[in-house]
Amino acid sequence: MTTTIYVPCDTTARSLGADAVAARLTRAAERLGVAIQLKRNGSRGLFWLEPLVEVETAAGRVAYGPVAPTDVDALVEAGLFEGRQEHALALGDIEAHPYLARQQRLTFSRIGITDPLSLEDYTARQGFAGLQHALALAPQDIVEEVKTSGLRGRGGAAFPTGIKWQTVHDTPAAQKYIVCNADEGDSGTFADRLVMECDPFMLIEGMTIAGLAVGATQGYIYLRSEYPLAHAMLDEAIARAEAAGYLGENILDSGQAFHLEVRLGAGAYICGEETSLLESLEGKRGLVRAKPPLPAIEGLFGQPTVVNNVLSLAAVPFILDQGGQAYADYGMGRSRGTLALQLAGNVERGGLVELAFGTTLRELMESFGGGTRSGRPLKAVQVGGPLGAYLPQSQWDSPIDYEGFAAFGGVVGHGGVVMFDDSVDMGDQARFAMEFCSVESCGKCTPCRIGAVRGVEVIDRIRAGERAEENLALLSDLCDTMVDGSLCAMGGMTPFPVQSVMKHFPDDLTPRQAEGGR
Amino acid sequence: MSHASPQAADTWTSAQIQAVVDEHRSLPGAMLPTLHALQDRFGHIPEAAIPIIAEALRHTRAEVHGIISFYHHFRTQPPGRHVIQVCRAEACQAVGARALEAHAKSALRVDYHQTTADREFTLEPVYCLGNCACGPSLRVDDEVHGRMDAAGFDRLTAQLSATVVEVK
Ligand SMILES: Cc1cc2nc3c(=O)[nH]c(=O)nc-3n(C[C@H](O)[C@H](O)[C@H](O)COP(=O)(O)O)c2cc1C
Ligand code: SF4
Ligand code: FES
């Protein structure tokens, strides 16, 4: 009998040695004359357990992790190929693990279970059921279903997806486009990457449904160049979907067409901003465009264009399959459905946590995250990427939803949660926020381009003890100028992390020599 | 793919450049795909490519320069045998990226955007590799490495230096 063994193939598992683990397992099986089939599944997103090896047994899959390459021989000796559970790394049924069992995985229902490039695996678990349903609907009815779901853009701005689609649907044009924003530039985020590396057909399906809804026949995935593995997976998935008739001139013999292509970015954070992204796709420098016109009316090559984040599009197959209401049944207030939270930074159990809106940060960081990796007390958490505020302890108990966070100046953004222990110097973090903006500004407007450079200088002066009071006031004014005078959120929100440090961690923004080494 | 071991970097002919450009020029929004293809093939975008691109895509040379310099990914100088990108972003900072970057610079005796004297390594900053739960992260060519520290960095660079150039 052949035993199926799973070794994840995503970037994180591989960054921790999954390929070497797979090679050693193969060698051990050959040596012992055991017949195994090694499958490279996606990651389940429990990153502290990667590489997470699973073995198919009569009683279901059993897991081991984290498995270092050097653990393989001992694990095999302790009966890994038979699924025996005596070894210290044995985890049993991983789906019963509280970290997974307590999640509400609507979008990430397949990751880690399937072979990302297997159409058979995909369709065996509801894959393309949403597309089949959409093909039987009128375009307006697809849009209605998305409106019913209450889905709001997961890329940062939280704009209602159904309304955006309606605008593109209602704007007549010979050519319309679906553009997937896969620039995922925020530090602390990897959910888009997981979709693309571990369940790429879901994104393809979501984009195809979007095309049917608004009358677009061409789609582009604008992918950051920092994700070479996602690139390879997407290219292969698109080729297979085309060959099987899920993409192309005549989708599933419906007479409807949708073509899809991956385009690579080139290491510019600002190209995640949708108008900068469109400029870049058109082959130009990624300078932000003034709005209006909205991309939904004049987008790529001047045509009506849906620009949506990977996660927004990846939520669509579920919505079309199970109904918009089934999605809307999760969540709180005006934040419907689930949010892919990403636990990162100094965290003991980092990974992907998909939950309905409404959990608290504390719950997330403590009962899922297990506190810091260093074991030291948590000091601050940055939610929502480099433009998000640093939140102190007093703000960890409010439920995570768009309105609730906005009320105290927080940003949910793309759902990244970056944890810092008490060894962090928040003055360094404030400085970095300005430095990052100075590196990544598109340069179109002065408050951002010049302000960020000045911001770094002023913070350096404060920390050097040069007229600290005066320079703190200057920093405060500079922040206000950037917030008020910037064309886009790059310049407009870079002050958020800086202001949060000034407000909640003022002791870290005093002259450094006075601090006495930590 | 991005740094997928460019075949014999810094050797190119105008005819080869022209061929790469011709292969991509008819795409809608051909500029970035063209630049990527050139860099993938030659390791960098040779100065000699600029007039060829400008001509094919109907831009001025200055515009082409402007586009190349806007994007951090594109380089106009040949890199070392391996490109090492150290993640400088927040989630990696939270677990020691600042120390790792300082170590990388001093161990290789270069600053960012520089190549070691033996032309083995080019060091670059990167802002997130999507490996943020297992940092500090760095990327060598197309491979990402997690939970890096100074000792891991030294082991990695020693291994890379030891591998002989593959003769294809
Ligand atoms: C500086 C900046 C960077 C951004 N980066 C991203 C990004 O990497 N990915 C993304 O989906 N949206 C990003 N956005 C948000 C996009 O502009 C846009 O709101 C989003 O792509 C719309 O899709 P959604 O409605 O599905 O969220 C960024 C915005 C700004 C201002
Ligand atoms: S705020 Fe900054 S990034 Fe945004 S348009 Fe202005 S200069 Fe460009
Ligand atoms: S912040 Fe370093 S990999 Fe994301």
Image (cartoon, coloured by chain):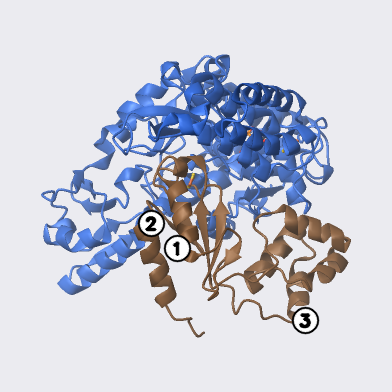
The residue labelled by disc 3 is B15
Q: Is any part of residue A408 visible from this angle? A: yes
| Alpha carbons under labels 3 and 1: distance apart | 40 Å
Chain letter, brown in picture: B
What amino acid does circle 2 point to? Ala
Name above or below for residue A241 compared with residue A427.
Answer: below
Looking at the rendered structure, the secondary structure element under dot 2 is helix
Q: Is residue A434 left or right of residue A14?
A: right
Circle 3 — which element?
helix
User: Left or right of A72: which side holds A50?
Assistant: right
x, y percent for residue A447: 76, 32
Question: What amino acid is at disc 1?
Answer: Ala
Q: Are marks 3 and 2 on the same chain?
A: yes
What's the residue type where badge 3 is placed?
A: Ala
Query: Tell me, what hue is chain A?
Result: blue
Q: Answer yes or no: do the residues labelled 3 and 1 have beta carbons within 8 Å?
A: no
C-alpha gap between disc 1 and disc 2: 9 Å
Question: Marks 3 and 2: which is nearer the front?
Answer: 2
Report the Cα–Cα distance between label 3 and label 2.
44 Å
* Residue A36 sits in quarter: bottom left
In primary-sequence order, the first of circles 3 and 2 is: 3
Camera-side mark, 1 or 2: 1
Residue A489 in the image: above or below residue A257: above
Q: Whole-percent x and y of residue A328?
A: 51, 21
